[in-house]
Image (cartoon, helix red, strand yellow):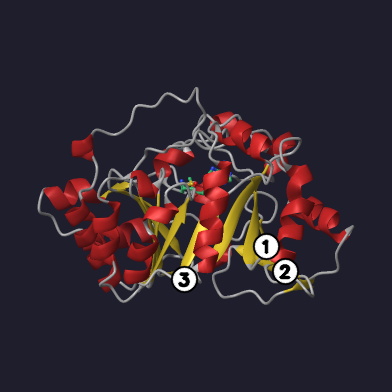
């Protein structure tokens, strides 16, 4: 079991398949972000992902999420999904949904039961403005296709003040009709995404807004939950809030990350990275490196947010852009 100095057990690995994405979401992959994609030779091959994942599984990983960039734009995504399906883990994926229809059978064959789809607006034009691409119809059709095929569908919605906070009631109304689990995510700072504290629409504000129209019930937290989940009587779906900025949940964190260029991050906000791929290619044993990386995990938010988010100077944060980490 991968334990850190705070006795947190880590059994969840998120693997970024690529730093490329077909969308240009303002908060993640803005149009003006210098692209500088990793060279193909610097990225983990499908076989290397398989080898590294296998070693993590031996060390106690029980859940693997494929992410990116957009994982489904990687040419050999289907092969990777197939390779990882042999491990005794819960295999899941986070996608923008644009290509999900091409993967339904692959997901099923790999035992993927739950798919997270990012969608920041239920308004076609606003969605285009936020994501930089006109893909709303395809994403929405694919969400319905996933539901029809009995996948659990979680919707990731990054809420930004004066951008899409006014859509929260519409997303909540959607959960009445469809068995979707909407997760409102507080806007987080990453390199190049023009974060400011003013744009954070906080957990408390979200709950207050939803309470204007609904009575909701808090659902029990699971051991490693990052979300605070709620149900509204009579609704088929649920809603949840990921309150990274206003109410961080680091004490129960069980997550580790592997970037597409094979660097291990022990936290989304970690300043340091461990070069797992470089070591593997040199023929070294990567187990001690993985254990050391976990051991060095900071108590909270990579040791970068030492104050409340309202006092945060985002220019001092030392990290990659979200698209380069893998969300
Ligand atoms: N391309 C896939 C997608 O769109 O879901 C996977 C990668 S994306 C980086 C993973 C998740 O990170 C998405 O749900 C996205 O909304 C979230 N995300 C990206 N940047 C964020 C930010 N600045 N604050 C909060 N969430 C963010």
Residue 93: percent from left, percent from top: 43, 59
- Alpha-carbon span between mark 2 and mark 1: 6 Å
What percent of the width, then of the height, locates residue 277? 22, 49
Relative depth, front residue between 93 and 12: 93
Name the spot of residue 153 as percent of width and height, x first: 55, 64
Residue pointed to by mark 3: 7
Residue under the point 21% across and 53% down: 46
Indicate if the residue with disc 3 has its beta carbon within 8 Å of ligand 1: no
Residue 118 seen: no
Residue 310: numbered disc:
none
Q: How far apart are marks 3 and 2 (CA)?
A: 29 Å
Residue 230, which numbered label?
2
Q: Is mark 1 within 8 Å of ligand 1?
A: no
Pointer 1 or 3: first along the chain: 3
Q: Can residue 162 be seen in this view?
A: yes
Q: Is residue 273 left or right of residue 159?
A: left
Neighbour tally class for label 1: few under 14, some 14-19, many 20 plus, Cα within 10 Å:
many
User: In the shown orientation, is residue 144 left or right of residue 201?
Assistant: left
Tag shown at residue 240: 1
Q: Which residue is drawn at 42% across and 49% down?
A: 99
Question: What is the distance, in whole Å, between disc 1 and disc 3 at their CAs?
Answer: 27 Å
Residue situated in front as seen by the camera: 273 or 30? 30
Do labels 2 and 1 touch, CB within 8 Å?
yes
Position of residue 301 relative to residue 24, above or below, is below
Nearer-N-terminus badge (3/2): 3
Comparing labels 3 and 2, the label whose residue is closer to the camera: 2
């Amino acid at each position: 079991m991968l334990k850190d100095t705070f006795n947190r057990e880590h059994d969840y690995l998120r693997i970024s398949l690529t730093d490329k994405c077909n969308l240009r979401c303002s908060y993640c992959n803005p149009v003006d972000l210098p692209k500088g994609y990793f060279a193909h030779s610097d990225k983990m091959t499908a076989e290397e992902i398989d080898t590294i994942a296998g070693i993590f599984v031996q060390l106690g990983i029980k859940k693997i999420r494929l992410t990116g960039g957009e994982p489904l734009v990687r040419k050999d995504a289907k092969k990777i999904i197939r390779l990882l399906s042999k491990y005794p883990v819960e295999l899941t994926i986070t996608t923008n949904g644009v290509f999900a229809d091409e993967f339904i059978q692959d997901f099923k064959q790999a035992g993927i039961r739950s798919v997270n789809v990012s969608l920041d607006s239920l308004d076609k034009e606003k969605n285009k403005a936020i994501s930089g691409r006109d893909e709303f119809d395809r994403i929405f059709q694919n969400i319905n296709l996933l539901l029809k095929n009995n996948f659990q569908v979680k919707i990731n919605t990054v809420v930004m003040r004066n951008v899409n906070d006014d859509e929260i009631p519409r997303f909540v109304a959607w959960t009445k009709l469809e068995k979707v689990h909407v997760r409102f995510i507080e806007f987080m700072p990453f390199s190049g995404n023009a974060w400011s504290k003013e744009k954070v629409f906080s957990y408390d504000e979200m709950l207050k807004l939803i309470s204007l129209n609904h009575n909701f019930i808090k659902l029990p937290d699971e051991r490693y939950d990052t979300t605070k989940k709620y149900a509204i009587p009579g609704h088929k779906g649920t809603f949840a809030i990921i309150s990274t900025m206003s109410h961080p949940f680091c004490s129960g964190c069980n997550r580790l990350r592997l970037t597409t260029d094979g660097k291990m991050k022990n936290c989304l906000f970690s300043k340091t990275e461990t070069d797992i791929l470089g070591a593997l290619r040199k023929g070294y044993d990567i187990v001690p490196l993985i254990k050391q990386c976990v051991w060095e995990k900071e108590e909270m938010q990579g040791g970068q947010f030492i104050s409340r988010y309202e006092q945060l100077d985002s220019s001092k944060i030392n990290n990659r852009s979200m698209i380069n980490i893998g969300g």
